[in-house]
Image (cartoon, helix red, strand yellow):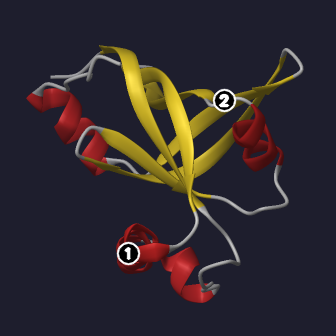
Amino acid sequence: MTKVSFNESEIDFLSKNEACRIATCHDGIPHVVPVSYIFENGSFFIATDYETRKYDNIKRNKTAALVVDLYSSVGNSAVCVQGTAETIEKGEEFSTLYKKFHDRFEWVRQDPWKEGEAPFVKVTPSNKVSWGLE
């Protein structure tokens, strides 16, 4: 898979936002939900639960898409990606991600979890499009 690169304005936009919508698919039916994310080293990381449709979908179909967007009456900005999703459930990578999520998001501090209780999802983009960025 060719690595997608992000320009400076895209990286700046992605680092200033914390919510996106992720789309997964089951039986040809799309499923889209809003989630918090961290963008790092060209990949997106989200937290999920084992009992969610998106987790089940990713275990069956690694294809995912997501969009980070801001819409207003004076202009729209967005970064959209398609790529491959994988779960991170334990180990050093899990611990590192958990600390980053804990430090960044109040909802994690309010409702903490441990390895084995909820995984992370890593989306590695294979293509992207963006607009409205300065």
Location of residue 34 in the rendering, given as x and y in whole percent from the top left corner: 64, 44
Residue placed under numbered mark 1 in the picture: 92
Location of residue 47 in the rendering, given as x and y in whole percent from the top left corner: 58, 60
Left or right of residue 83: residue 38 = left
Q: Is residue 55 above or below residue 1?
A: below
Residue placed under numbered mark 2 in the picture: 23
Residue type for callout 1: Glu
Depth check: give the residue in front, 36 or 1.
1
First in sequence: mark 2 vs mark 1: 2
Secondary structure at numbered mark 2: strand
Depth check: give the residue in front, 18 or 38.
38
Residue in the image at 62% along x and 64% along y: 119
Label 2–label 1 contact, CB within 8 A: no
Secondary structure at numbered mark 1: helix
Q: Is residue 126 visible?
A: yes
Depth check: give the residue in front, 6 or 3.
3
Q: Residues within 10 Å of mark 2 (few under 14, many from 20)?
A: some
